[in-house]
């Protein structure tokens, strides 16, 4: 037919091969997606099983039974050794330190001289007061003689006045002279007393140049050196030595106000000085200070030491265990101790997670006393069991876990 060209055999063959290729490619993609959809649930299941099989890393601690003093301890607190009698000895007058007679560690008796001050000015004032007193005393005989003469003159004039030989004015002048000399005599006698008082003041200043210990104790610091000028007006900055009465040492601790009901005067305690952790010091509560620190929410407690020892020194750190009044009954009720971090709140209940045979067991417990970072568990935990102290959030009963101590 005119206008129509026949296709060549080679062109028809190429077209047929292209159509087959397109058909085969589409079939492969379809088969891939069918296989992927079929395998996806299996992959999810495998991932879920792997996740479930994964073990959670947790930190654990071993529950333990209280032993020894812990079994009768109702409260623990930290504090310091504190002296009830501690004095910074300063001068009563302004003067230069001439001599210091003690060193740190020197034991002194009450009234013992610990330092001497320059007394040159005080002795000069003493000598001047004595001179003024001598002058005042010297005027007394002279005034007494003049008064006696004036009284005799007044007697003669008064006798002449009776015979009207002298005028009344002369009598008045003679009487005024007597009264004047009597006043001068009284003034002279007061000056003698005043001078005597000044002598006593000057003597006291000389005595104050010897600085004495106010009580028996031990010198713990020297606060001045020879050559320094000290003054009572600035006693806080011008102390000479500091003395501590070692027999007055006691322990002062701060107890949280919520635990104050556990403390009472006379209660037995055992203290441990940080420097000697294996040495226990018996004591008793002397007083609970009737005032609280509003910022720290604590109350100070003073504890008397029953047995004094040279190792007990001011300002040493100390740990105090307050003991139960009835040790026997407390021992019968003593529970198991675990770290406070092991306690958790789940649905309003206090629980712990127990690590046992590679799994976690959620267990409700009954907590009791808190003791220096540990809490007593009255019911729910046995000694020797392992409890979780740290781990990821969302722990559940039955979770697999790995323990880290």
Image (tube, grey):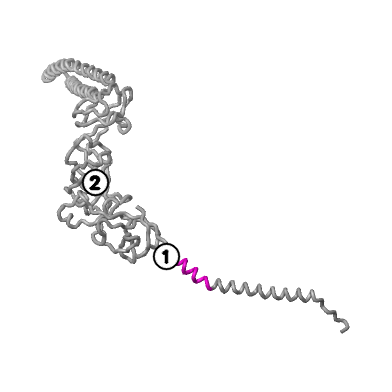
Magenta-span inclusion, residue 208: no
Q: Quadrant of the N terminus?
A: bottom right
Q: Main secondary structure of the magenta part?
A: helix
Is 358 drawn above or below residue 180 in the view shown?
A: below
Does residue 10 appear to the left or right of 143 in the view shown?
Answer: right
Q: Residues within 10 Å of mark 2 (few under 14, many from 20)?
A: many
Q: Secondary structure at mark 1?
A: helix
Residue in the foreground of this view, choosing between 272 and 352:
352
In percent of width and height, residue 72 lies at: 19, 51
In percent of width and height, residue 215 lies at: 20, 32
In percent of width and height, residue 350 lies at: 30, 62
Which mark sits nearer the N-terminus, 2 or 1?
1
Is 340 drawn above or below residue 303 in the view shown?
A: below
Q: CA distance from mark 2 to mark 1?
A: 48 Å
Is 77 drawn above or below residue 316 in the view shown?
A: below
Q: Secondary structure at mark 2?
A: strand
Q: Which residue is mark 1?
A: 52
Query: What residue is rendered at 30% in x and 49% in y?
Result: 293
Q: Residues within 10 Å of mark 1 (few under 14, many from 20)?
A: few
Q: Which residues are magenta?
A: 38-52
Which one is closest to the eye, mark 2 or mark 1?
A: 1
Looking at this rendering, what residue extends furthest in the right direction? 2
Quarter-of-image position of residue 362:
bottom left
Quarter-of-image position of residue 3:
bottom right
Q: Would residue 313 be visible to someone looking at this image?
A: yes
Residue in the foreground of this view, choosing between 151 and 80:
80
Q: Which residue is mark 2?
A: 320
Does residue 275 appear to the left or right of 55 in the view shown?
Answer: left
């Amino acid at each position: 037919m005119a206008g129509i060209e026949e296709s060549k055999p080679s062109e028809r063959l190429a077209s047929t091969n292209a159509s087959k290729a397109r058909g085969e490619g589409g079939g492969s993609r379809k088969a891939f997606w069918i296989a992927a959809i079929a395998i996806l649930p299996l992959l999810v299941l495998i991932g879920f099983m792997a996740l479930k099989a994964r073990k959670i890393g947790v930190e654990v601690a071993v529950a333990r039974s209280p032993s020894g003093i812990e079994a009768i301890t109702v409260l623990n607190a930290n504090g310091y050794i504190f002296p009830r009698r501690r004095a910074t000895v300063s001068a009563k007058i302004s003067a230069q330190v001439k001599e210091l007679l003690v060193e740190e560690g020197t034991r002194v008796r009450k009234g013992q001289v610990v330092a001497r001050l320059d007394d040159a000015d005080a002795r000069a004032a003493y000598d001047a007061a004595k001179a003024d007193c001598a002058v005042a005393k010297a005027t007394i005989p002279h005034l007494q003689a003049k008064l006696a003469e004036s009284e005799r003159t007044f007697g003669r004039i008064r006798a002449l006045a009776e015979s009207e030989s002298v005028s009344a004015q002369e009598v008045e002048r003679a009487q005024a002279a007597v009264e004047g000399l009597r006043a001068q005599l009284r003034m002279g006698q007061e000056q003698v007393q005043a001078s005597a008082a000044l002598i006593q003041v000057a003597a006291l200043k000389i005595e104050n140049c010897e600085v004495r210990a106010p009580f028996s104790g031990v010198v713990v610091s020297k606060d001045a050196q020879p050559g320094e000028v000290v003054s009572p007006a600035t006693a806080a900055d011008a102390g000479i030595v500091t003395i501590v009465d070692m027999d007055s040492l006691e322990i002062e601790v701060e107890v949280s106000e919520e635990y104050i009901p556990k403390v009472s005067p006379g209660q037995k305690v055992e203290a441990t000085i940080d420097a000697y952790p294996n040495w226990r010091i018996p004591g008793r509560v002397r007083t609970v200070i009737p005032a609280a620190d509003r910022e720290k929410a604590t109350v100070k407690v003073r504890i008397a030491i029953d047995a004094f020892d040279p190792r007990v020194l001011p300002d040493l750190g100390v740990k105090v265990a307050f003991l139960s009044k009835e040790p026997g009954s407390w021992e019968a009720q003593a529970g198991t101790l675990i770290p406070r971090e092991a306690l958790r709140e789940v649905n309003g209940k206090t629980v712990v997670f127990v690590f046992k045979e590679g799994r976690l067991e959620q267990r409700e417990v009954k907590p009791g006393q808190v003791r220096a970072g540990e809490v007593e568990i009255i019911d729910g935990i046995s000694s020797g069991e392992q409890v979780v102290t740290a781990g990821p959030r969302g722990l559940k009963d039955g979770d697999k876990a790995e323990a880290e101590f």
